[in-house]
Image (cartoon, helix red, strand yellow):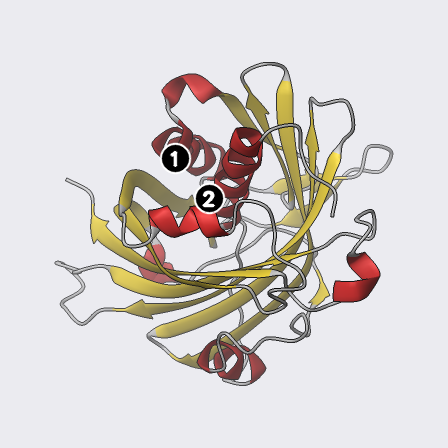
Amino acid sequence: MSRPPTQRLRRNLFWLALLLLVWLLCSGQAQAGPLNDRLQQFPHWTAAPPTQPAQGDLFYPDWMAGTWTLTTTLVDLAAPLAPDLVTPGFEGNRTFLHQPVTCTIRFVPAAPTVAGRILPRITTAPGGIVSDRAFNGRSLAQAYLGEGAVQAVKVDPQDPNRQVTLLRGDRQLESTVTGRATETPDPDTFITSELFQQVFRGTAQPYFNRVENTTAYHRLSGSAAQSPGFEADQVTAIYLSPQDPDYFQAQDTPVALYRYHLAFAPAT
């Protein structure tokens, strides 16, 4: 299996990839189905989830609108192909179990999105709730990596599914959503799954990665005027890219799984 230049770089890449994934999720009007079952089957995952090509902006339920204090905690991890295939740094990541990380994030009404350089067209009308991706990405990156490690987080104005994080030392991580699926089993539950292609640049050779983020959000009970917030069960799966020499051995089976508990409380 190919390896980045240093173990520290690999670990920073791992955390940066995970934290950026949280804010490239969408909503939908589907019934409960394979995504809900998928979370129940953790860690017995042998393939990527069924998704559709990602198009347009990514919407959240209205009850997620506002500014929140996020606390994310790694609660479990698994290597489905161990001992034959284990990603570098997997065992070291056990040190992050049950270690909460906290930051401020916000969800805001969407602004119109214009796509197309030759024939511009509006692809997203205002009114839906979306992540403030640049703000949230930077806030999360600083919480995980430190304020000095992140220079900027930029979202492509013509493609909300593409995000670039500029890091110290002329390095950057580009994340592009390629597939998406959603389920809404009830008004208080919202399940999403996203597939990403990621490229890390700034080393002798670019490092490629494939990632899945499947999350079930649940609104907590309370009055609309005094919402207690919401929580989520999230699993991030790491897949080998076709550029990896072990790709054909793993194929669509994830080589690492990380499960998180997310808690969102109204920011003070």
Answer whether labels 1 and 2 touch (C-beta < 8 Å). Answer: yes
Give the crowd class for mark 2: few <14, some 14-19, many >=20 residues within 10 Å.
some
In front of the other: 210 or 113: 210
Q: Position of residue 238 (x, y in %)?
A: 61, 56
Q: Position of residue 97 (x, y in %)?
A: 33, 53
Say which residue label 2 marks: 19
- Say which label, 1 or 2, has the lower sequence index: 2
Residue farthest toward the top in the current orientation of the protein: 169
The quarter of the rendered structure image containing the C terminus is top left
Q: State which quadrant residue 171 falls in.
A: top right
In front of the other: 3 or 160: 3
Amino acid type for the residue under numbered disc 1? Tyr
Query: Measuring 61% from the left and 64% from the top, which residue is drawn there?
Result: 83
Give the answer, above or below, for where 213 lies relative to 136: below
Query: Measuring 63% from the left and 15% from the top, which residue is drawn there?
Result: 170
Say which residue label 1 marks: 144
Q: Is residue 127 visible?
A: no
Q: Position of residue 223 (x, y in %)?
A: 14, 67
Query: Measuring 50% from the left and 47% from the top, which residue is drawn there?
Result: 18
Q: Is residue 183 visible?
A: yes
Q: Position of residue 207 (x, y in %)?
A: 72, 36
Query: Measuring 12% from the left and 58% from the top, which residue is drawn there?
Result: 226
